[in-house]
Amino acid sequence: MQNLIAFFEKETNKKINIFEYSNQILKNNQQIVTFNDKTYIIQMDDKFVLNNISGHFYLIYQQNLEFDNLKRILDNLYENINIFEYNQYLILNSNEILDIDLSTPEIIESETYSKTYIAYLGKINNIDIFNFRLSILDEVLSLLNVGTNLSKFITLHDLTIYKAISLIGKEKSFYSLIDFESIKNMDENLLHTGLSFIENDLNISKTSSYLFLHRNTLIYRLEKIKELLGLDLKTFKDSFVFYLSIKSHFASKF
């Protein structure tokens, strides 16, 4: 019987329950099969079973995930997709890459009234790769609420950055390279301004519009950061060090 269950789960990527048929009325997710001269009911649940996986994978996270509601929204947005509930995520699977971008979490939030993050894990045909990328997302999930986080659509490149921040937070020797005492004493609005400047591609105009700040006020804050930390955020190396340091600082509070 276990071999039969394993076979159906591998073929359908769904959790399968099998029990003997005794003339009961079938539900929508139940089918009758005959095996070794006995009749059984196969019941397929929506729970995702990681066996025969293939295609592009997107993971949707909400703090209080309402699977049925999210599934209804996504079914209306996209065609030819598979939707599963797995652990704390909704998994969206498609043979083709979907039109999901920075605006998609906002569309879902307008329907569910719940903060939404979407992570693209890439095109995957190997369960080990899926599990590895999922484990990184699990590990860095708390960092999604750290700092400004301009985007709620997380790419593979974003996961790389979050993983680096997570590793830095665990590496105590890193703290000897950065003046974290000065960072702790700084106005958090100043730190958030620096993060926003970096996440807006080191662009004064974009950052001013995003923060609703006058251009001169933004420039003053960037100069203040340079004065206090010796980091010129208009340069790549200094902005890189600032970003990792401040993200690690905020992460340590959680």
Image (cartoon, helix red, strand yellow):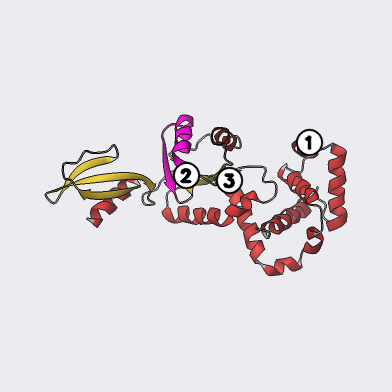
Q: What element carries label 1?
A: loop
Question: Which x, y percent locates residue 216?
Answer: 88, 39
Nearest-to-viewer mark from 3 and 1 = 1
Q: Give the quadrant of the N terminus.
A: bottom left
Mark 1, Cα crowd under 10 Å, few <14 / some 14-19 / many 20+, is few
**Is residue 80 found left or right of 7 in the rendered image?**
right
**Is residue 79 found left or right of 62 in the rendered image?**
left
Question: Which x, y percent locates residue 87?
Answer: 45, 51
Residue drawn at the location 80% of the way across and 39% of the way down? 204
Q: Mark 2 points at which residue?
A: 90
**Residue 155, which numbered label?**
3
Total count of labels: 3
In reply to whether residue 78 is colored magenta, the answer given is yes
Q: Mark 1 points at which residue?
A: 212
Amino acid type assigned to the residue bearing label 3 in the image: Thr
Nearest-to-viewer mark from 2 and 3 = 2
Residue drawn at the location 49% of the way across and 38% of the way down? 97
Q: Find the distance from the CA under tag 3 to the CA under tag 1.
A: 27 Å
Q: Is residue 230 visible?
A: no
Chain part drawn in magenta: 67-86
Contact, CB < 8 Å: mark 1 with mark 2? no
In this picture, is 97 found above or below 157? above
Q: Find the distance from the CA under tag 1 to the CA under tag 2.
A: 34 Å
Q: What element carries label 2?
A: strand
Q: Is residue 220 visible?
A: yes
Residue drawn at the location 78% of the way across and 46% of the way down? 193
Mark 2, Cα crowd under 10 Å, few <14 / some 14-19 / many 20+, is many
Question: Which x, y percent locates residue 23?
Answer: 16, 41
Contact, CB < 8 Å: mark 2 with mark 3? no
Question: Which x, y percent locates residue 116?
Answer: 57, 41
